[in-house]
Image (cartoon, coloured by chain):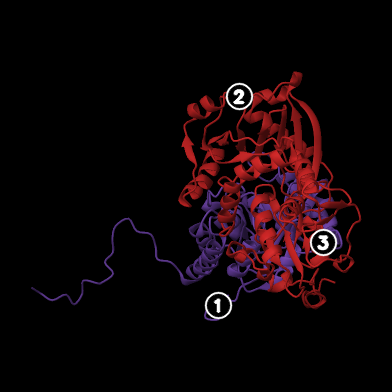
Chain colours: A red, B purple
């Protein structure tokens, strides 16, 4: 197992439980995207235009979450902050509402469960929301979990099942001697496999309710505030996650402007948040693929190598289905039909070819900007 | 551009482009779809913000690779700049990062409308032209300012049809026509396009090209919308050259009265 984030640890746990001897290589388990992610489990609200195959996988994995959470909590003996209060999608201004409505109309068209609400109904559900709100919708099946607690629990569960964690980093797959190597290295998978997995930067904030109490709202709230997309994830322990930017960059600097925009949008939607403590500002790198869907399955041309990466915005929600199906693949050698649209071989045209990196010399000469 | 089209495209900054459509990448949620949209649009010129892309060495699989594969020319822009000094600095950074002295100059004057600040824009344009840049300024639909921009040596003028991302179309078509008549350089309608008819109208008003981003990238089906825009720009240009009929208050039968059988 190369990579000990949520995906790598979940696969390790499932594999070890099935009696396989598992070694997880990661110098700092859970320190990548897993340690930054908000932990929304949103098969409905995350269904976006043009991502044809992804909603089905999101829905499948979300359906596995209740069982996965229960088993994991029992196996690890530690809570993971799994909450099922649902998600409210809201629009602050008329323009914001129109934008939000356009997306949920699309999601309704896919047959996904999301219910439009009048402004008064939105506030009845969540009185902490601003009175200025123009409307929203409720997605009852979009839940949340605390990814940091999840990493801790998965690690404990994997180790209890017999998996071994070692802190030696892997810089080349030839360093790993095992019948099967699973690459779950997030953005690091690009260098190891040549797959087109790129870093997509996200800046995210953590607030804490004053006086050690729980936050003043219980739903995941997401939407637009004056054109600014934002989400708010309240945890029972008082934490509120405010996210997140989506930037085509590979640094992890936190910018004043991004913090300002996120906080302004958050406070616009839930005015009381202005009184919360700002306890953390951080940036992480999502492993993104050209079509925003993960890469799951055998690595072409490399017998014995399986990849499970490129989960982009969806690593936490996709952890159960990834772990189950990759463990099946490792044990049986046969990919589940569910994995078919997500194979590494779908990137075989253009620069998506494994091993192809950077701009080709040929084309730079052709357009003459050298 | 299809081979059957009688339109040979347009020239800006000494470069010939077969397609009169220029695409922006802002708002694209999915690189795979963006790539298909860029190809479907037939465009040869794509604008992107310096700060949106990672120009650090060793990064791959991102926007730059994609545009490279599509074989389009890059037009870096100064999106997000509010002063002339800032825009000039970003233009220089972009020249170093992308190896092109072309710049889509944006100097925003107001956060809510994202309309340009004409005073700062003109100042930045003058300085960048002097520094050897090929400057394509995003401007308001003001014919006087457009003329001033052309006078300082801009390679084109790019008036807004409506505020960026609003999809409101062309708010003041007459001003676009006036701009077309007041400058010699290409006029590129930039911002405000919501759907294909807006792009066609821009071409019918005499614009040399249309630049749009959100209309395609935020459409439910960006590839279909990119295709629609390609046809709209071609259709609008052909209609412009074809000489439209006069608008009349009353009908005029297309079949003349002469030769009607006497019953």
Query: Image quarter for residue A23?
Result: bottom right
> Percent x, y for residue B43?
63, 68
Q: Earlier in the sequence, mark 1 or mark 3?
A: 1
At a point 60% along the width and 42% down the height, the residue shown is A66
Q: Chain of mark 1?
A: B
Question: Gap in Å between the C-alphas at discs 1 and 3?
Answer: 35 Å
**Can residue A78 be spotted in the picture?**
yes
Label 2 sits on a secondary structure element that is: loop
Disc 3 crowd rating (10 Å Cα; few below 14, some 14-19, many 20+) is: some
- Image disc number at residue B59: 3
At a point 58% along the width and 57% down the height, the residue shown is A51
In the displayed structure, A331 sits above or below A114; it is below
- Image disc number at residue B2: 1
Disc 1 crowd rating (10 Å Cα; few below 14, some 14-19, many 20+) is: few
Question: Gap in Å between the C-alphas at discs 1 and 2?
Answer: 57 Å
Nearer the observer: mark 1 or 2; the answer is 2
- Image disc number at residue A331: none
Closest to the observer: A78 or B263?
A: A78
> Percent x, y for residue B48?
72, 58
Closest to the observer: B141 or B181?
A: B141
* Same chain assignment for discs 1 and 2: no
> Percent x, y for residue B82?
76, 43
Label 1 sits on a secondary structure element that is: loop
Closest to the observer: B208 or B251?
A: B208
Query: Image quarter for residue A220?
Result: top right
Residue named by callout 2? A128
């Amino acid at each position: 197992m190369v990579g000990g984030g949520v995906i790598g640890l979940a696969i390790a746990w499932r594999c070890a439980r099935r009696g396989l001897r598992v070694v997880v290589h990661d110098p700092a388990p859970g320190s990548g995207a897993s340690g930054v992610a908000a932990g929304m489990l949103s098969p409905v609200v995350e269904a976006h235009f043009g991502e044809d195959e992804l909603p089905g996988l999101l829905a499948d994995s979300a359906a596995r979450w209740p069982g996965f959470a229960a088993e994991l909590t029992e196996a690890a003996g530690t809570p993971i902050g799994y909450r099922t209060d649902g998600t409210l999608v809201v629009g602050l201004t008329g323009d914001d509402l129109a934008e939000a409505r356009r997306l949920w109309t699309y999601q309704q068209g896919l047959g996904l469960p999301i219910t439009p609400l009048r402004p008064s109904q939105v506030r009845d559900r969540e009185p902490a929301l601003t009175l200025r709100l123009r409307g929203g919708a409720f997605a009852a099946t979009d839940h949340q979990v605390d990814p940091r607690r999840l990493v801790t629990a998965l690690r404990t569960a994997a180790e209890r099942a017999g998996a071994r964690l070692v802190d030696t980093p892997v810089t080349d797959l030839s360093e790993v001697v095992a019948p099967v190597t699973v690459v779950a290295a997030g953005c690091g998978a690009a260098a190891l496999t040549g797959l087109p997995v790129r870093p997509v930067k996200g800046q995210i904030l953590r607030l804490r309710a004053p006086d050690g109490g729980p936050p003043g709202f219980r739903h995941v709230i997401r939407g637009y505030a004056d054109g600014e997309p934002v989400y708010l994830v309240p945890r029972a322990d008082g934490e509120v996650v405010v996210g997140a930017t989506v930037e085509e960059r590979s640094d992890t600097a936190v910018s004043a402007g991004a913090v300002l925009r996120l906080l302004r949008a958050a406070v616009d939607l839930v005015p009381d948040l202005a009184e919360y403590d700002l306890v953390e500002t951080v940036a992480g790198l999502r492993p993104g693929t050209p079509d925003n869907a993960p890469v799951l399955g055998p690595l072409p041309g490399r017998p014995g190598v399986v990849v499970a990466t490129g989960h982009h915005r969806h690593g936490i929600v996709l952890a159960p289905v990834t772990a189950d199906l990759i463990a099946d693949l490792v044990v049986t050698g046969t990919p589940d039909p569910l994995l078919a649209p997500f194979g590494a071989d779908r990137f075989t045209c253009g620069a998506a070819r494994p091993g192809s990196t950077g701009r080709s010399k040929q084309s730079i000469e052709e357009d003459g900007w050298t | 551009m299809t081979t059957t089209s009688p339109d040979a495209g347009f020239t800006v900054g000494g470069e010939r482009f077969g397609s009169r459509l220029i695409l922006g990448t802002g708002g694209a949620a999915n690189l795979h779809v963006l790539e298909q949209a860029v190809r479907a649009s037939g465009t040869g010129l794509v604008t992107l913000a310096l700060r949106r892309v990672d120009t650090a060495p060793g990064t791959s699989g991102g926007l730059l690779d994609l545009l490279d594969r599509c074989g389009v020319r890059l037009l870096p822009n100064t999106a997000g700049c509010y002063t002339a000094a800032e825009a000039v600095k970003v233009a220089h950074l972009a020249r170093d990062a992308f190896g092109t002295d072309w710049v889509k100059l944006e100097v925003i004057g107001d956060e809510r409308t994202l309309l340009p600040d004409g005073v700062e824009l003109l100042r930045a344009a003058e300085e960048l032209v002097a520094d050897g840049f090929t400057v394509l300024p995003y401007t308001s639909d003001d014919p006087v300012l457009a003329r001033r921009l052309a006078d300082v040596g801009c390679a084109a003028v790019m008036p807004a049809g409506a505020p960026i991302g609003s999809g409101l179309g062309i708010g003041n078509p007459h001003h676009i026509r006036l701009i077309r008549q007041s400058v010699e350089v290409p006029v590129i309608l930039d911002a405000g396009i919501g759907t294909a008819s807006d792009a066609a109208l821009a071409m019918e008003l005499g614009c040399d090209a249309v630049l749009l981003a959100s209309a395609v990238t935020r459409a439910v089906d960006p590839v279909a919308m990119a295709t629609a825009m390609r046809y709209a720009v071609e259709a609008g240009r052909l209609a412009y050259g074809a000489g439209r009929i006069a608008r009349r208050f009353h009908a005029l039968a297309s079949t003349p009265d002469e030769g009607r059988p006497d019953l």
